Image: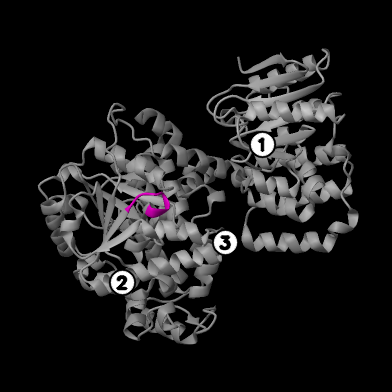
């Protein structure tokens, strides 16, 4: 039974039991409404709503997303709770999120375990609270605090919720026992129903100018996103309208959000993230290996960041460097990173010290004899990596997983440097590794199933989104990035300035433009990599001649104060530089390119179509398991706007026929082989099929 009703002396107890997270399914809503109605007819003096299992109601039933809402709706249930003639107490443990917290807010009193958390995270799905959240929260904690809480979507602790006034009592111990005691206390005190709807918001607390200022803040903080702005509209309505009118307004904005492309994209990413760690065909009986101690080879920026990722999850780490000086520098960088986190209030000093204490250092490979996993994060050279793995093969215990953080190189060739290729896997972290959530898990030809199972489980354990990739140059993300970066260079030499290219992509929603990213990373990195390639491997000179010319002028990017842009030495603010335009024009003449005016539309299409076309090739080759995995890679690793759902979702929303026609037109106009439409895209369009159809057939 999803919802049960029982009496405990003078109290009515409504229990919800809908594992795993007591989601607000139709059955739960119906059961709660019936139980509240029943409680009005007996001689109970107060009603307690609590949940079985590990949590209070953690939100809506995601399986009902996008479907017509079957009555009773949550607003109807909440109205019945608030209208109860007897006081209703919500007893919270675990998390009360989204609709679950809105239900708790419709109760007259709220109590919670001190370990609990509450929040309204709907904005993360392109939605807003649609069952009274935007109307009730500002009545309890004020407009500014409500705006901060709901537009951020972040959870807050029970203690903070108590301090703000969202919760009335916090306790430790057993949730039911404590909640019933609190309910009896209220009865003894003669406390009746206390309805948030009857609380007035002081009109002078937040005026129209303050709302406008907050909207402007969100335009920067939540660039391009619609839902945060609609949340502000709803909270402003809470001040200007009656409670009932505010609810109607909120619900209309909620329905608009539900039907928006942005919410569809964000819901797609939500599901894709949860699907990504699942590996089709992997024997479910295969148990992951135990990972209790990890080693990292290389204490540079990447190695240190990876070490922090494990220490943050409570896993001891040994950092290995060639010499003590390099090791000391790496550990000092880690200390500075933790100090920065403490200064921002995201970590206590005690927590930082404890995490740093989990990271030890060594210069001796023999100290890695007992680790369960070792991750190589050294220079991107196959010769260097083969040497490292040959040494690891000698010192690491049987069953230890040997992983490479390579972002391009052939993991099969790396594995061949060992006598145990079944234990070798790619674990491609993204910089800064302690911050970025993406982890590409690269399966080589001989990687054992339990190694893959371990890598995917471990990714989740350290707070990453693991995505499985096959072996090819650049795997999923960097293979696609090459096509994207190529178009930035070609658009530039053909007629666009850096500021136009970057502006087009950032207005689309990318976190940074491709040329600004190059300056941030350092133009010398790509330059050095190209020096090791033959002219044939380098490809079209037009796609790198400008970058090479800038490097040879000493313009390496932000670190030298000049790259595609010039950078202020104090603020790092970037500005256009006429010297760069002169370089571009000179290289265009040398390459025989006649420059022209490029429209913003052409620039955007060329970048996006390059990503999409390569994505279809990657899917067809089996390098990625599913279209959603590619989207997760680009949203979490490359700054693609989550509210557009990733390149493959964007292609589906635009229409595969339209995408095919645009790519084919680029192919015809340029004659370039790389613009030939991917065979899979061509096949789907000819058969009038979608990516969903292809996945269904594949599975």
Magenta-drawn stretch contains 315: yes
**Earlier-in-chain disc, 1 versus 2:** 1
Where does the image place residue 595, in percent across and percent down from the top left?
44, 76
Determine crowd level at label 3: few under 14, some 14-19, many 20+ residues with C-alpha closer than 10 A.
Answer: few
Determine crowd level at label 2: few under 14, some 14-19, many 20+ residues with C-alpha closer than 10 A.
Answer: some
**Earlier-in-chain disc, 1 versus 3:** 1
Q: Secondary structure under badge 1?
A: strand
Quadrant in which the N terminus appears? top right
Foreground pick, 467 / 307: 307
Residue 522 shows in the view:
yes
Task: Place residue 214 in its image quadrant.
Answer: bottom right
Q: Residue at x 78, y 50 (%)?
A: 233
Q: Secondary structure under badge 2?
A: helix
Give the labeled residue for mark 1: 112
Region in magenta: 311-316
Residue lying farthest to the top in this orientation:
42
Real-space Cα separation, disc 1 to disc 2, in angstroms: 46 Å
Give the labeled residue for mark 3: 345
Q: Secondary structure under badge 3?
A: loop
Task: Place residue 320 in its image quadrant.
Answer: bottom left
Give the labeled residue for mark 2: 328
Magenta-drawn stretch contains 8: no
Task: Report the side of 309 relative to 192 (left or right).
Answer: left
Where does the image place residue 573, in percent across and percent down from the top left?
54, 78
Real-space Cα separation, disc 1 to disc 3, in angstroms: 25 Å
User: Is the Cβ of the residue at disc 3 closer than 8 Å to that at disc 2?
Assistant: no
Q: Is 353 drawn above or below residue 550 in the view shown?
A: above
């Amino acid at each position: 039974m999803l919802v049960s009703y029982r009496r405990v002396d003078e109290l009515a107890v409504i229990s919800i039991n809908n594992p795993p997270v007591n989601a607000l399914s139709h059955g739960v809503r119906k059961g709660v409404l019936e139980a509240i109605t029943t409680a009005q007819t007996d001689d109970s003096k107060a009603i307690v709503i609590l949940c079985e299992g590990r949590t209070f109601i953690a939100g809506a039933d995601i399986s009902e997303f996008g479907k017509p809402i079957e009555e009773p709706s949550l607003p109807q249930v909440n109205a019945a709770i608030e209208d109860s003639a007897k006081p209703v107490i919500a007893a919270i443990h675990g998390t009360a999120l989204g609709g679950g917290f809105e239900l708790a807010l419709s109760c007259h009193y709220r109590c919670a375990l001190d370990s609990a958390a509450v929040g309204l995270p709907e904005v993360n799905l392109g939605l807003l609270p649609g069952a009274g959240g935007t109307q009730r929260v500002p009545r309890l904690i004020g407009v500014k605090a409500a705006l901060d809480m709901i537009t951020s979507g972040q959870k807050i602790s029970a203690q903070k919720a108590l301090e703000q006034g969202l919760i009335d009592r916090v306790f430790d111990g057993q949730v039911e026992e404590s909640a019933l005691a609190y309910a009896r206390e209220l009865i003894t005190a003669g406390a009746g129903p206390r309805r948030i709807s009857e609380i007035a918001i002081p009109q002078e607390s937040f005026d129209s100018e303050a709302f406008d200022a907050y909207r402007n803040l969100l335009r920067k903080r939540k660039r391009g996103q619609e839902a945060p702005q609609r949340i502000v509209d709803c909270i402003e309505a809470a001040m200007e309208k009656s409670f009932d009118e505010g609810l109607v307004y909120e619900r209309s904005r909620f329905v608009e959000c539900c039907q928006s492309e942005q919410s569809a994209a964000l819901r797609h990413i939500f599901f894709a993230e949860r699907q990504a760690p699942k590996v089709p065909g992997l024997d479910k009986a295969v148990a992951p290996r135990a990972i209790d101690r990890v080693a990292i080879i290389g204490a540079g920026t990447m190695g240190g960041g990876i070490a922090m990722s494990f220490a943050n999850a409570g896993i001891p780490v040994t950092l290995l460097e060639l010499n003590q000086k390099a090791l000391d520098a790496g550990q000092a960088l880690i200390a500075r990173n933790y100090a920065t986190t403490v200064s921002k209030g995201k970590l206590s000093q005690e927590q930082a010290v404890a995490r740093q204490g989990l990271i030890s250092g060594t210069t001796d490979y023999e100290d890695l004899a007992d680790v369960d996993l070792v991750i190589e994060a050294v220079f991107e050279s196959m010769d260097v990596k083969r040497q490292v793995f040959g040494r690891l093969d000698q010192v690491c215990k049987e069953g230890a997983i040997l992983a490479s953080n390579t972002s391009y190189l052939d993991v099969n060739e790396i594995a061949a440097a060992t006598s145990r290729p079944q234990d070798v896997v790619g674990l491609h972290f993204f910089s800064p590794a302690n911050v970025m959530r993406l982890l590409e898990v690269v399966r080589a030809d001989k990687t054992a199933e339990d190694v893959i199972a371990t890598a995917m489980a471990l990714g989740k354990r350290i707070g990453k989104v693991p995505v499985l990739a096959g072996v090819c140059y650049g795997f999923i993300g960097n293979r696609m990035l090459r096509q994207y970066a190529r178009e930035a260079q070609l658009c530039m030499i053909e007629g666009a300035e850096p500021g136009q290219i970057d502006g087009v992509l950032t207005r689309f929603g990318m976190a940074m433009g491709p040329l600004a990213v190059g300056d941030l990373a350092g133009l010398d990195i790509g330059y050095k990599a190209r020096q090791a390639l033959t002219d044939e491997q380098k490809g079209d000179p037009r796609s790198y001649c400008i970058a090479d010319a800038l490097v040879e002028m000493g313009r390496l990017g932000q670190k030298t104060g000049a790259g595609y842009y010039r950078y202020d030495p104090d603020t790092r603010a970037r500005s256009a530089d006429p010297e760069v335009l002169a370089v571009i024009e000179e290289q265009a003449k040398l390459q025989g390119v006649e420059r022209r005016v490029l429209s913003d539309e052409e620039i955007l299409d060329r970048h996006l179509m390059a990503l999409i076309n390569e994505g279809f090739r990657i899917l067809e080759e089996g390098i990625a398991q599913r279209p959603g995995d590619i989207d997760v890679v680009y949203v979490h690793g490359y700054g693609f706007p989550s509210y557009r759902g990733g390149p493959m979702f964007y292609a589906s929303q635009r229409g595969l026929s339209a995408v095919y026609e645009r790519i084919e037109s680029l192919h015809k106009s340029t004659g370039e082989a790389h613009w030939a439409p991917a065979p899979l895209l061509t096949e789907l369009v000819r058969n009038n099929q979608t990516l969903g159809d292809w996945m269904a057939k594949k599975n």
